[in-house]
């Protein structure tokens, strides 16, 4: 985690600003402040506790709503006077009921949303779900579908029908993600391989 002794609490009269980010979506959820006591409580209980500048007391996010901010990781900035918390939120972060205190939706970006949907189906099967039908059919069936969709994409690539080409591209990406889930991997595992290859060049 962090070395508390290196943090500069003196710069802002005993408190440090804390940026809170969803560990999965990378969306910024809120900004709060901690004194050393609040930080120690956070690190010990693995739930974010802040220092209220108006009420002059500690408060744990979710103590009323139960929408806790569960600690995943914390890092200090280059000056050791600001903290970045990565969390797993139990629910909406803002007291208004919004996902974030900046009124933004806390959603997966890029292909992460698709991966999240497929993983949810894998963990919590839904009757009538095509994803669950594929997963239940086994690796061979899923792999076969990836091959079929790849061939169909190649065929459409030879023509100039934008809608059909993009449709087949979407089908291939979807089935590829189902195959990753069936094998127990995530897209980030593949990205790690690509990054490693790039670094070796």
Image: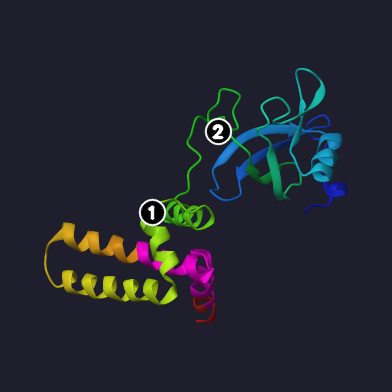
- On residue 100, the disc is 2
What is the x, y in percent for residue 88? 64, 45
Task: Look at the image and give the residue range highlighted in magenta.
Answer: 174-196
Furthest-left residue in this view:
160
Residue 167 vs 196, above or below: the answer is above
- The Cα–Cα distance between marks 1 and 2, rounded to whole angstroms, is 31 Å
Q: Give residue 62's quadrant in the image.
A: top right
Quarter holding the N terminus is bottom right
Relative side of 166 to 201, left or right: left
Q: Give residue 155's quadrant in the image.
A: bottom left
Q: Residue at x 50, y 29 (%)?
A: 103
Q: Residue at x 17, y 69 (%)?
A: 156
Q: Give residue 63's quadrant in the image.
A: top right
How is the rendered protein coloured? rainbow
- On residue 162, the disc is none
- Residue 188 is a magenta residue: yes
How busy is the neighbourhood of tag 1: few (under 14 within 10 Å), some, or many (20 plus)? few
| Residue 10 is at least partly visible in this image | no
- On residue 129, the disc is 1
- Residue 143 is a magenta residue: no
Magenta region, mostly helix, strand or loop? Answer: helix
Residue 146 vs 200, above or below: the answer is above
Relative side of 54 to 124, left or right: right
Q: Nearer the viewer, mark 1 or mark 2?
A: 1
How busy is the neighbourhood of tag 2: few (under 14 within 10 Å), some, or many (20 plus)? many
Mark 1 falls on what kind of element?
Answer: loop
Furthest-top residue in this view:
55
What is the x, y in percent for residue 47? 75, 40
What is the x, y in percent for residue 78? 71, 50
Mark 2 falls on what kind of element?
Answer: loop
Q: Residue at x 65, y 39 (%)?
A: 19
Dot 1 or dot 2, earlier in sequence? 2
């Amino acid at each position: 985690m962090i070395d508390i002794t290196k943090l500069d609490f003196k710069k802002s009269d005993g408190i440090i600003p804390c940026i809170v980010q969803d560990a999965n979506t990378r969306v910024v959820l809120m900004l709060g402040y901690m004194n050393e006591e609040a930080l120690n409580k956070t690190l010990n209980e693995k739930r974010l506790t802040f220092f209220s500048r108006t009420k002059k007391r500690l408060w744990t996010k979710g103590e009323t709503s139960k929408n806790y901010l569960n600690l995943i990781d914390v890092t200090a900035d280059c000056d050791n006077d600001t903290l970045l918390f990565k969390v797993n939120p139990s629910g909406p972060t803002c007291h208004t009921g919004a996902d974030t205190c900046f009124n933004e939706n806390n959603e997966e970006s890029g292909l992460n949303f698709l991966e999240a949907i497929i993983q949810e189906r894998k963990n919590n099967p839904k009757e009538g779900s095509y994803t669950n039908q594929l997963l239940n059919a086994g690796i061979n069936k899923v792999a076969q579908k990836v091959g079929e969709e790849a061939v169909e994409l190649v065929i459409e690539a030879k023509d100039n029908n934008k809608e059909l080409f993009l449709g087949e591209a979407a089908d291939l990406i979807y089935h590829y993600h189902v195959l990753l889930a069936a094998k127990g991997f995530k897209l980030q595992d593949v990205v790690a391989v690509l990054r490693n290859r790039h670094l070796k060049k």
